[in-house]
Amino acid sequence: MENKITLLPGTPDDDNRDYLPLSLMGTDIVVNESGNNSQPYPKNLKEYKANLVDNYENVWYEYVPQSYNPKVKCALVFSIHGGIMTGWGQAIYTSWTLMAERDGFICVFPNACVGGGWQLPRGKWDWNPNHPDGKEYAWTPEWAEPSPENVQENRDVRMIFELIKLMKQKYNIDEGRIFMQGMSMGNAMTSFFAREFGNVLAGAAGSGTAAYLSLLYDENMHIKNKAGHIPVWQSRPERNRAPELESRELKVNKYNRLYWIKINECHPIPEISIHGEHNIAYFKGAKADLVYMDIKNRDHGQTFDDASLIWDYFFSGLRREKDGSIVSTATARKWEKDAFAIAVAKDCQNAWTQNGIQRMKAPARCWQKIKYHGLNGAKRVRGEFLCVPLSFLAMMFDAEYCPDASGASVTLKFIDKRTAQFAQGSIGCVTDNTIRSMYCEAQYHSGDLYVSIEWFCRYLFDLHVSSCGDVVYVTDHHSEISLFMADLITDLLLDEPAK
């Protein structure tokens, strides 16, 4: 039985400009920056200190829900903070404690061991100790030194293993339901742990920047991995680094996806759901699944609901058996792909419909609406629209396609008895025996009339249409397609996921 989630009111500190203000610790003060929101300090969040490795005083924070029953096994979630942050900072900037209170699992928020050459007041994770700061970048062709062969020497890794052992001594932990999630550098640490020791976890998730490609592949693009398959959730904010490094980040995100698609033996065609700003592609795998989420118009970091999405749709239904296999059961919230969705991309002849690929008669075309009268030979672009063959739209909306002898005039007859007539070169559409102007004129190409898919779906069917770059996404609910999802869909339509 779920316990009720209750948000506690906090005292806003909108004048704060510190990365992690100490005034938040143990208080009801909250800060909010570009959607990265804190909550009041949870009363059940407890700080612990002990020399776990190398006589170094480790610090971590435990959250035990009120409903914890030592006679009942429960899941354990490690949430790993970002660079120059702390465990308690990760706790208040996420919804993990709220989900733990609702569903009765335990959360641990460790501080990084300050090491690996970092001289900072707060921790940075030692996820690649052989790599000097500033040498390697995820978006360059340079290949930095790999992680050491004996990763057991990594102090942060050993601390996590000691904490796992300690949690199993203190609490009745279900060994098959241990999870890890991290943000930014914590995501890098989580990815590192998943590649090296993921066999001890039932799932891993990360928010923010993707892993450096030189940590995933060698110089010949061969995968580097020791732990094998593991269910993975990747959250990538659309404005993580865009637009300055947009093209490079697209590549890094793409090859991070391909890495786990290959290891988990996922089907290359995902199930897609775009609800509001959440753009989710769910890849089903023979060994384990991969979920890729892009968050529209969000900067680097993690959204406050990231933890709840990961838990509700993924972690809550996962278990690793003793033989290493992953078992998926019912999740706290049922995952549902978009029941109705159409996606088209500039110059692509394939379209995305019913969570699959549909071939159109001819590729989608981009058309500009031009103003030139009174400009003395000059012109101005007053709109740019993606246009598709009417024959494709007729098929999508179960309409009878009725062209005239030339094909330059087409009437669609819909099952609700409505009709819509279009003609080459005309911006008008005849519907209900009256004229309505479209976004741009109908064009005749490849033996078919082309019209704006945005106008057609919005005006004739009152559907929600969003666009990003050269991709248009149509649904029967509010959706905002984002940069990385548009890139993923374009790859699917081009059938070129690895290029």
Image (tube, grey):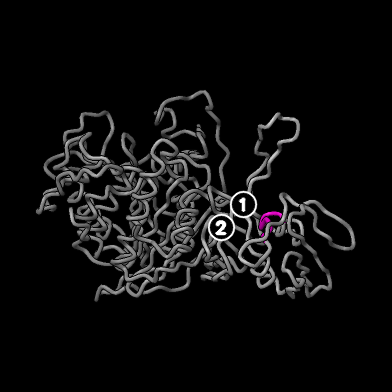
- Residue pictured at 50% horizontal, 39% vertical: 37
Q: Would residue 123 appear left or right of 67 to someone viewing this image? A: left
Q: Which residue is mark 1?
A: 466
- Locate residue 61: give its quadrant: top left
Q: Secondary structure at mark 1?
A: strand
Q: Is residue 76 visible?
A: no
User: Residue 278 at what x, y percent from top left?
Assistant: 53, 53
Q: What type is the residue that disc 2 sits on? A: Ile
Q: Secondary structure at mark 2?
A: strand
Q: Is residue 468 visible?
A: yes
Q: Is residue 133 above or below residue 359?
A: above
- Locate residue 405: give its quadrant: bottom right
- Residue pictured at 31% horizontal, 68% vertical: 264
Q: Is residue 381 above or below residue 234?
A: above
Name the front one of labels 1 and 2: 1
- Residue pictured at 55% horizontal, 71% vertical: 358
Q: Nearer the viewer, residue 139 or 436?
A: 436
Instruction: Look at the image and tell me in which quarter the C terminus lies.
Output: bottom left
Q: Would residue 467 appear left or right of 108 to someone viewing this image? A: right
Q: Residues within 10 Å of mark 2 (few under 14, many from 20)?
A: many
**Which of marks 2 and 1 precedes in the sequence?**
2
Q: What range is drawn magenta here?
A: 450-455
User: Residue 475 at what x, y percent from top left?
Assistant: 64, 61
Q: Would residue 107 appear left or right of 324 to someone viewing this image? A: right
User: Residue 479 at what x, y percent from top left?
Assistant: 61, 54
Q: Which residue is mark 2?
A: 274
Q: What type is the residue that disc 1 sits on? A: Ser
